[in-house]
Image (spheres, rainbow, N blue to C red):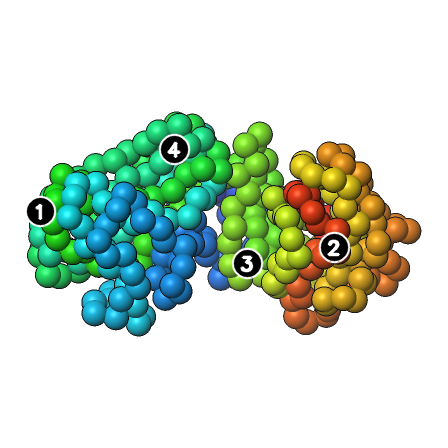
Amino acid sequence: MHSQYFLRFYNRDLTFAEVRALTSGIPVTYIDSGASMTTLITNGSMEADANWANYGTPTTQERSVTQKHSGTYSRKFTVNAANEGIQGDAFITATGKKYRHIVWVYPSGTAVNIGVQKGDNSGWLDNSQYPGLNSGAWNRIVVNLTESAGGGGAFIVIHSGAETSGTWYVDDIWGGAIGLLVEYNSSAMHILQWGDNSSNENHGDVANAIPSNLPVGHNTRYVKKGITSNTTFGNALPPLYAVKGLVLEETAGDAVVLEISTFAGRDDIIAGFSLGSVGMEYVNSPVISSGHAFSLTSTRSLIVESDTWGTSSINVWFLLEKVM
């Protein structure tokens, strides 16, 4: 007599320990509902008339309603010389991580060039021509790359390459990490961000990751870097979580006095906290207001404000705890 066992795999990124826990009925560390990775490309939808600069000197570079892949607008450029087009805003990459960029292009000819700058801004990670496109139609181009030198200076360029005339429309550009996105740290699962446990701190931004099985007392963190002005992080405080502590680091500029709250001007987390020039502070009770705001049913914003920013730049680690 023998028994049969059936095992169905739902996620190839689960570890052996997680698969074993699932098959034996033991709860895994974290369950979320509806998480999705956000794009690295600012205004890749082209709906805003912003975030795209000239690459070279195209004769026309503008938001356009003439052709669009989705929404109302695309980005149009017309050239009269080689290597002219559009350049997007900078984004952050991590060395050794794999990235995918998806670009929709409507060319007057049959080719386009796509370049991606290394994160340390030292040169091209890739700058290739994509021939064989359908002229006068939308073409989907997928670019897969492994970052060799990560940093905050990566950007994408769509340009004419060797072509010295023609018009291109560009829309719905998406870019993001693929494969194993980060080395997840289960103590840093957050509604908007999954924490990276590796030294590169490639914390992955997500959307709508609602924790559903974490116990009372669960601690997590939300990390935001390079804050230089009054900034609101919408929906950053999950339901049932309160701010337990803060790590504040000033990386540039003079001393700054900070107010942190869940509503503008309310100062319900900290009020009038002085952070020294190029220093780091851990802030907890009693500096953090007693009864700091949280909600039983909805997310709340975390707001960082100051009247004395000057040239200051700060990093903030919000330390959060599930209270009920």
Residue 240 location, quadrant: bottom right
The residue identified by callout 2 is 306
Q: Is 313 in front, or is 138?
A: 313
Which of discs 3 and 4 lies nearer the camera? The answer is 4
Tell me how far mark 2 sits from mark 1, CA to CA: 53 Å
Nearest to N terminus: mark 2 or mark 4? 4
Q: Is residue 172 above or below residue 19?
A: below
Q: Would residue 94 appear left or right of 260 to someone viewing this image? A: left
Residue type for callout 2: Ser
Q: Residues within 10 Å of mark 2 (few under 14, many from 20)?
A: some
Residue 4 place in picture, x, y as percent: 39, 46
Which of discs 1 and 3 lies nearer the camera? The answer is 1
Q: Residues within 10 Å of mark 1 (few under 14, many from 20)?
A: few
Tell me how far mark 2 sits from mark 3, CA to CA: 30 Å
The residue identified by callout 4 is 118
Tell me how far mark 2 sits from mark 4, CA to CA: 34 Å
Image quarter where the C terminus lies is bottom right
Q: Is residue 227 visible?
A: yes
Nearest to N terminus: mark 1 or mark 3? 1
The residue identified by callout 3 is 209
Q: Is residue 216 visible?
A: no
Q: Would residue 245 appear left or right of 58 to someone viewing this image? A: right
Nearest to N terminus: mark 4 or mark 1? 4
Residue type for callout 4: Lys
Tell me how far mark 3 sits from mark 4, CA to CA: 30 Å
Nearest to N terminus: mark 2 or mark 3? 3
Residue 261 place in picture, x, y as percent: 75, 61
Residue type for callout 3: Ala
Q: Is residue 57 above or below residue 95?
A: below
Residue type for callout 1: Gly
The residue identified by callout 1 is 132
